[in-house]
Amino acid sequence: MRGTPIGGGLAGATDASQTTATIHSVETFGTVDGPGIRYVVFFQGCPLRCAYCHNRDTWTRAGGKTVKVADLAVDIERYAGFLRPSGGGVTATGGEPLLQAAAVGELFDLVHGLGLTTALDTSGHAAITPVIHALLERTDLVILDLKHADDDAHRNLVGVTNRRIFDFAREVARTGRPLWVRHVVVPGYTTAEADVAALGSFIAELAEHGDLQRVELLAYHELGRHKWEALGERYLLESVSPPTANEMRAVAEVLEGYGLPVRRPD
């Protein structure tokens, strides 16, 4: 992880900035979205429509709150004293932070000024533009959620093609950014051996050309179902149960067959 020397602080760096971002919320003591203790910013808006989304209320920009990036950085500075010793920092997630890449990049610059690390938790659904390149240069860790290797199945599960996402993944590998891949195990949707093998082959390609550090398997759950219901919508996977231990093991073993550093849930 990169980070800048401890003790610099913001030192007036926020005075001139008027850049704003639309966020859903923040979490000041995150422990699962990157190393150490992390200040997690949930950006509002997402181009995906995942059938199992547990942040359904972040899909559209409406309903979010507009904040100055500088003010967000000032709030982060309040917590730097316990984030920094843990090797932690700030994670941008969502929703989809790439929709607000310029604002995230500015935030990451300020975060580095506090001696904290930066993590980008993303679906990767974005064109590779100069703004995206600039953001990756300011990112110490990319946490990339790969949904499905088959494009048709990907469209069915999350509403968009996987081609742009896979292109983004290859770009992350090319830049040498440390990479964690996440994959949600959804029974009947992402558990077929051939599909898992295709995903494993692609992730192995990323490992060969980049700095893949881990592959995290996440078990599908229904914890976000109440958000769909609160919005008056039907939860799309209401008949799907969480994966069994055997199903999780089977997916893990296929991926491990490609020499990947797989982490299973405890």
Image (cartoon, grey):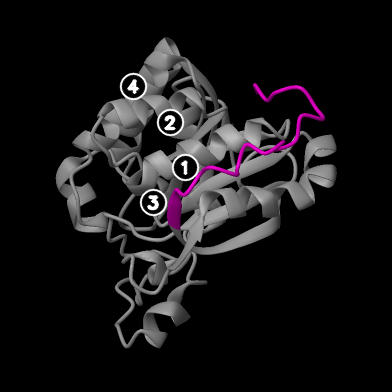
What SS does tag 2 mark?
helix
Residue 207, above or below 69 = above
Q: Which residues are magenta?
A: 1-21
Residue 3 within the segment the image draws in magenta: yes
Residue 204, above or below 64 = above
Residue 96 is labelled as 3
Residue identifier under label 1: 104
Pointer 4 with pointer 3, Cβ within 8 A = no
Residue 159 position, x and y percent, is 20, 56
Residue 253, above or below 229 = above
Residue at mark 1 to residue at mark 3: CA–CA distance: 11 Å
Three-letter code, disc 2: Leu
Residue 49 within the segment the image draws in magenta: no
Q: Earlier in the sequence, mark 2 or mark 3?
A: 3
Identity of the residue drawn at 44% across and 27% down: 136
Q: Residues within 10 Å of mark 3 (few under 14, many from 20)?
A: many
Residue 172 position, x and y percent, is 40, 23
Residue at mark 2 to residue at mark 1: CA–CA distance: 7 Å
Residue 184 is labelled as none
Residue 220 position, x and y percent, is 47, 59
Q: Is residue 166 left or right of residue 240?
A: left
Which label lies toward us, 1 or 3? 1
Q: Look at the image and tell me whether residue 202 can be seen.
A: no
Which label lies toward us, 4 or 2? 2
Q: Earlier in the sequence, mark 4 or mark 3?
A: 3
Three-letter code, disc 4: Glu
Residue at mark 4 to residue at mark 1: CA–CA distance: 18 Å
Pointer 4 with pointer 1, Cβ within 8 A = no
Pointer 2 with pointer 1, Cβ within 8 A = yes
Residue at mark 4 to residue at mark 2: CA–CA distance: 12 Å
Residue identifier under label 4: 171
Q: Main secondary structure of the magenta part?
A: loop
